[in-house]
């Protein structure tokens, strides 16, 4: 099917990428409304847990 | 929590490696590997750029088009994840930014600059005024085309940086409610300190370029029935007339200023500037990004107001009317930035490239927001409800 309207000027590849991203935003919005700051805080908290050096203590031992 | 998605994670088992000069030899070495990967399945392909000084743009294009090839069933192209581990310069840096998801290890060296034609110089010997001016014209056109290609490849990343900065930008604007700063001013204020000295220079060049758009465009708007599209040459003639008037007025305090002594070259510069601005302003892709990211660009009240509009077309129009005015200057600044990257030698660190929208992620830098977060994020599973024993019930 040919893309219509705004998206007609973009090739299918861009459309796919934009749609994937749209879906991801949709999902995040379901939980956070448009409170972007809260979302950023939560993800950073999750990644900070992984970056915690105490978790890698074993690799630092001799 | 983040659940890893193969759309955003490099896969060394389904990868090609670029090391050294981009030339025919490299293309011959990589072609069989790429064809094999394409024939196996349509999963993402990782392109590792280990250490490359760049080289032939034709080779870079050849690698990219082969990687993006379809198959006999007309399947969509494989997604490309590009990763630089040490150095990507010139055409290799362009290749990096061309990835659907571009990643850099921390401490990498990236170099962006305009095109060179060392191969053409012998053919142009002896250099005459006509031949050099033709060469200059060709280089300018090629650089402009490359700048617009870079816009296409990096626009999503740059708009994403802008949107992710909205909460901090709001704080700056709320701190000065009497004289609120524009979104672009806030964006520049927040981004500049995060850049290296060399990247700050590019940012400054883009700002100067952007600052030149405004008075030029004001003159153009008055003189040339802005918005009405005519024959291209007639349209350009209107633009040139408006620029001539602008330059004369702008230099009236300088009695020694003439078109013959430098003014004409400025007119040519201005003409290309107006063209690039108009191209960026009428860009349909900008509208698409405005729509996609509007949920974070608008306040809750503004979103509610739009939601109350009954028809979808009206909703879209209202949304663009609200989002495009603040986003447009940032977008035009970004276009100016891509043109600035095609001038001189611009050496960047991994973090610089992230802030300028040239890559998506710097490995291990958890403080730098990525689009991957949106795709991989899942709400934490709820702990199971405590089981109530029968004796407690009784």
Image (cartoon, coloured by chain):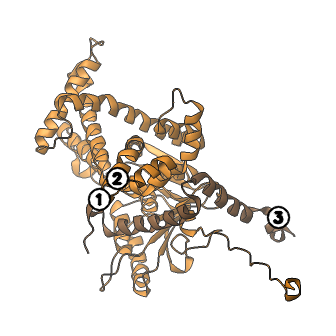
Chain colours: A brown, B orange
Residue hosting label 2: B287
Question: Does residue B386 lie above or below B252 as drawn?
Answer: below
Quadrant housing the N terminus of chain B: bottom right
Mark 2 belongs to chain: B
Give the secondary structure at mark 1.
helix
The spot of residue B293 in percent (x, y) is 45, 55
Quadrant housing the C terminus of chain B: bottom right
Front residue of B218/B362: it is B218
The image quarter in which residue A39 lies: bottom right
Q: Residue at x 52, y 52 (%)?
A: B353
Q: Are marks 1 and 3 on the same chain?
A: yes
Instruction: Measure the alpha-carbon separation of dots 2 and 1.
Output: 8 Å
Left or right of B287? Residue B374 is right
Left or right of B38? Residue B51 is right
Residue hosting label 1: A6
The spot of residue B291 in percent (x, y) is 39, 55
Residue B196 shows in this picture: no
Front residue of B382/B91: it is B382
Residue hosting label 3: A54
Crowding around mark 3 (Cα neighbors within 10 Å: few <14, some 14 to 19, many 20+) is few
Give the secondary structure at mark 2.
helix
Instruction: Measure the alpha-carbon separation of dots 1 and 3.
Output: 50 Å
Crowding around mark 2 (Cα neighbors within 10 Å: few <14, some 14 to 19, many 20+) is some
Question: Does residue B343 lie above or below A34 as drawn?
Answer: above
Give the secondary structure at mark 3.
helix
Tell whether label 1 touches label 2 (CB within 8 Å). Answer: yes
Front residue of B385/B138: it is B385
Question: Does residue B258 lie above or below B100 as drawn?
Answer: above
Instruction: Measure the alpha-carbon separation of dots 3 and 2.
Output: 46 Å
The spot of residue B145 in percent (x, y) is 29, 51
Mark 1 belongs to chain: A
The spot of residue A34 in percent (x, y) is 54, 54
């Amino acid at each position: 099917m040919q893309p219509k309207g705004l998206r007609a000027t973009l090739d299918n590849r861009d459309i796919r990428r934009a749609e994937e991203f749209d879906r991801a935003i949709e999902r995040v919005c379901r939980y956070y409304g448009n409170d972007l700051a809260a979302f950023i805080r939560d993800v950073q908290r999750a990644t900070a847990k992984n970056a915690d050096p105490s978790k890698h203590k074993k690799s630092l031992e001799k | 929590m983040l659940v890893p998605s193969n759309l955003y994670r490099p896969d060394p088992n389904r990868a090609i490696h670029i090391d050294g000069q981009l030339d025919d030899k490299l293309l011959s070495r990589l072609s069989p590997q790429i064809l094999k990967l394409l024939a196996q399945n349509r999963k993402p392909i990782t392109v590792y750029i280990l250490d490359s000084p760049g080289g032939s743009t034709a080779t870079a294009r050849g690698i990219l088009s082969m990687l993006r090839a379809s198959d006999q069933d007309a399947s969509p192209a494989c997604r490309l994840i590009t990763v630089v581990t040490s150095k990507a310069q010139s055409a290799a840096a362009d290749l990096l930014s061309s990835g659907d998801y571009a990643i850099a290890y921390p401490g990498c060296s990236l170099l962006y600059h305009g095109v060179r034609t060392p191969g053409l110089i012998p053919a142009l010997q002896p250099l005459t005024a006509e031949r050099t001016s033709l060469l200059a014209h060709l280089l300018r056109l090629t650089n402009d085309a490359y700048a617009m290609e870079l816009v296409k490849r990096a626009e999503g990343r740059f708009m994403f940086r802008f949107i992710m900065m909205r909460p901090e930008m709001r704080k700056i604007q709320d701190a000065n409610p009497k004289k609120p700063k524009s979104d672009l001013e806030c964006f520049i204020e927040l981004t500049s300190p995060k850049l290296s000295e060399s990247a700050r220079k590019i940012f400054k060049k883009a700002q100067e370029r952007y600052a030149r758009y405004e008075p030029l465009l004001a003159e153009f708007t008055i003189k040339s029935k802005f918005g009405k599209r005519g024959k291209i040459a007639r349209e350009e003639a209107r633009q040139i007339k408006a620029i001539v008037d602008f330059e004369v007025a702008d230099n009236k305090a300088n009695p020694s200023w003439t078109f013959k002594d430098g003014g004409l070259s400025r007119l040519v510069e201005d003409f290309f500037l107006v063209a690039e601005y108009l191209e960026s302003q009428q860009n349909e892709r900008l509208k698409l990004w405005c729509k996609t990211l509007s949920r974070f660009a608008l306040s809750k009240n503004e979103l509610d107001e739009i939601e109350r509009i009954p028809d979808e077309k009206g909703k879209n129009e209202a949304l663009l009317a609200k989002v495009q005015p603040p986003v447009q200057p940032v977008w035009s600044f970004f276009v100016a930035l891509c043109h600035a990257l095609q001038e001189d030698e611009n050496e960047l660190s991994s973090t610089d490239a992230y802030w300028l929208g040239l890559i998506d992620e710097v490995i291990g830098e958890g403080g730098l927001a990525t689009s991957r977060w949106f795709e991989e994020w899942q709400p934490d599973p709820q702990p199971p409800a405590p089981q109530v024993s029968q004796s407690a019930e009784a």
